[in-house]
Amino acid sequence: MTDTIDAIFDAVAETAAEVRGVLGERRSYAEGHNPTGDRQLAADVYADELLEQRLLDIPAVGSYASEERDAVAEDSGSYHVASDPLDGSSNLKSNNGMGTIIGVYDEPLPAAGEALQAAAYVLYGPTTTMVTAVDETVTEYLLEDDERSVLQEDITVPADPTVYGFGGRAPDWPDDFSTFVKEIEERRLKLRYSGAMVGDVNQILTYGGLFGYPMLADQPEGKLRLLFEGHPIAAIVSAAGGASTDGTQSLLTKEATELHERTPVFVGNESLIDDLESALDGQ
Ligand code: AHG
Ligand code: MN
Ligand code: MN
């Protein structure tokens, strides 16, 4: 791991501790909407500003882009960070899990999946954990008392899948996707959908299975954003021996041409991703 990537992971861990500490008092809405039209919470804005400051303080970090801001914040340096500062922030109201997602690229943003050098997410659950992927190795850390300690090294997606969860309203799913979902249920996978991608993906790494936010009737590109959610999560699941797709191709082979571009997102066991791509082949 390069020193810069390690410094980025340290900055994210340090920021996560502060974000976690203020979540309770930042449940209210802020003034505006983010560039993809979501109403922003004070916590979204707080996490975004803290990450910008901490990450741009690292000399080799040349820019910071996030789901919560229109434009890239520029500095000088050869690494470029994309962030979803608070993933699943609507779960704040109901006190359910949330996360922070980071992708580290070696090209200015927007960029292709191939430019991704490392990725990480923080999960604010009963404990705060961070999962990183670098050099095709996935590691889970416990974030506690300003320390980052290894919980699990060389994480791999369990071979025998157990859980699944898909976003959006079932009546808005394409017919071939709905048929595929019925098959998944018949294989006795258990439904686990939390409304926070990070929480759901952490279950895939723990139990094996498939998470997705599909194409919808009124929004064929789905909801999730390629740079801030799709690429980094795909990189983590792929480094753990799983796979990703937008329905036809790996998310890591997709190039973002716009910062806030959306894409259908599916990640999980490679066999399930293959089956899903076959099921959607007729589209
Ligand atoms: P964000 O809070 O960053 O906008 O992300 C929410 C995402 C993702 O975490 C989750 O899987 C999905 O949106 C939930 O959406 P629905 O409420 O439409 O299921
Ligand atoms: Mn998100
Ligand atoms: Mn978010």
Image: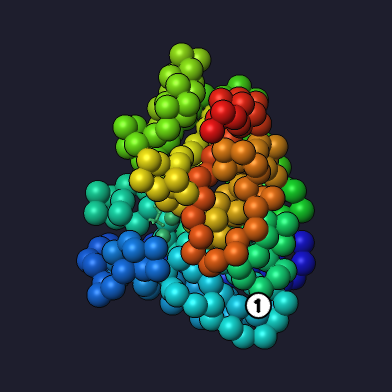
Please name the residue that numbered disc 1 is placed on: 61
Q: Residue at x 39, y 34 (%)?
A: 173
Decide if ligand 3 comes within 8 Å of the CB at mark 1. Answer: no
| Mark 1 crowd level (few <14, some 14–19, many ≥20, 10 Å Cα) | many
Q: Is residue 64 left or right of residue 34?
A: right
Looking at the figure, which quarter contains the N terminus? bottom right
**Residue at the front extreme of this rendering:** 282
Q: Whole-percent x and y of residue 175?
A: 42, 27
Give residue 60's position: percent from left, percent from top.
Answer: 70, 79
Mark 1: secondary structure = strand
Q: How many marks?
A: 1
Residue 61, compared with residue 92, is above or below; it is below
Along the viewing direction, whichever of 255 and 281 lies nearer the viewer: 281
Tell me which residue sits at (57%, 71%) in the image: 11
Compared across the picture, whether 235 is left or right of 41 comes to right
Q: Residue at x 24, y 67 (%)?
A: 29
Quarter of the picture for ligand 3?
bottom left
**Res 205 → quadrant:** top right
- Is residue 218 shown above or below 51? above
Residue 174 in sight in this render: yes
Q: Which of the pair 141/173 is nearer the observer? A: 173
The percent position of residue 90, horizontal first and vertical second, equals 30, 54
The quadrant of the picture occupied by the C terminus is top right
- The picture places residue 79, in percent across and down from the top left corner, at 69, 73
Q: Residue at x 31, y 69 (%)?
A: 33
In the displayed structure image, the side of residue 174 where residue 79 appears, left or right: right
